Image: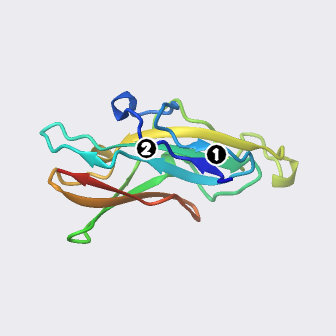
Amino acid sequence: MPDYKITKNCNFEDVYPGFSANSCSPEIIVPTFEGLLINTPPKVPLSAALSVKVACSFAFSLRRDLGVLERVENEIVFTVVDRETNITYSGKMPNMDHSIPSPGRSKKTLRREELPDQIIESYVNVDLVKVVRMQKKTGRYKVYATVSTFKSNTLDFEVY
């Protein structure tokens, strides 16, 4: 059985930037899974209001030191690569008030071994056009997300 499930026939119209789960959010099945997962539509029509949405799920142990100073959601780097030109666009989610604390960090000073042995799962949804500032043009692209030493699955999408 795989550690996760990514639904391909979901409605990305229901995905809004922020921190909520939705029908397109990758589902983490194995409770000990740690990492990032993304989902994006395979095809997006080109328009003046181009929006390429990504639903991201992530899970990390409270004991894991990700080496991030901010909240995890604000440290995830989304990267888009134009398959034809190899031009790379990348950016982070803008800071928002709804985020959860970074695993391994606390307002109190605790040693990592004093933290509960618990996996925290959360979600973040972004519009790649705004976050990575990719050009609004037709083409084939690949997208992935990273935080610390973790890299998500890589997905292909087309703007037509």
What's the residue at 41%, 35% (across, down)? 10
From the top left corner, tell me how far across and down residue 126 is, in percent. Answer: 39, 41
- Looking at the rendered structure, the secondary structure element under dot 1 is loop
From the top left corner, tell me how far across and down residue 35 is, in percent. Answer: 61, 54
Q: Amino acid at mark 1?
A: Ser
Q: How many marks?
A: 2
Q: Amino acid at mark 2?
A: Lys
Q: Is residue 120 above or below residue 63?
A: above
- Looking at the rendered structure, the secondary structure element under dot 2 is loop
Nearer the observer: mark 1 or 2; the answer is 2
At label 2, counting other C-alpha atoms closer than 10 Å, the crowd grade (few under 14, some 14-19, many 20 or more) is few
Q: Quadrant of residue 79?
A: bottom left
Q: How is the image coloured?
A: rainbow
Distance in Å between CA atoms under marks 1 and 2:
29 Å
Please name the residue that numbered disc 2 is placed on. 8
User: Residue furthest toward the left?
Assistant: 48
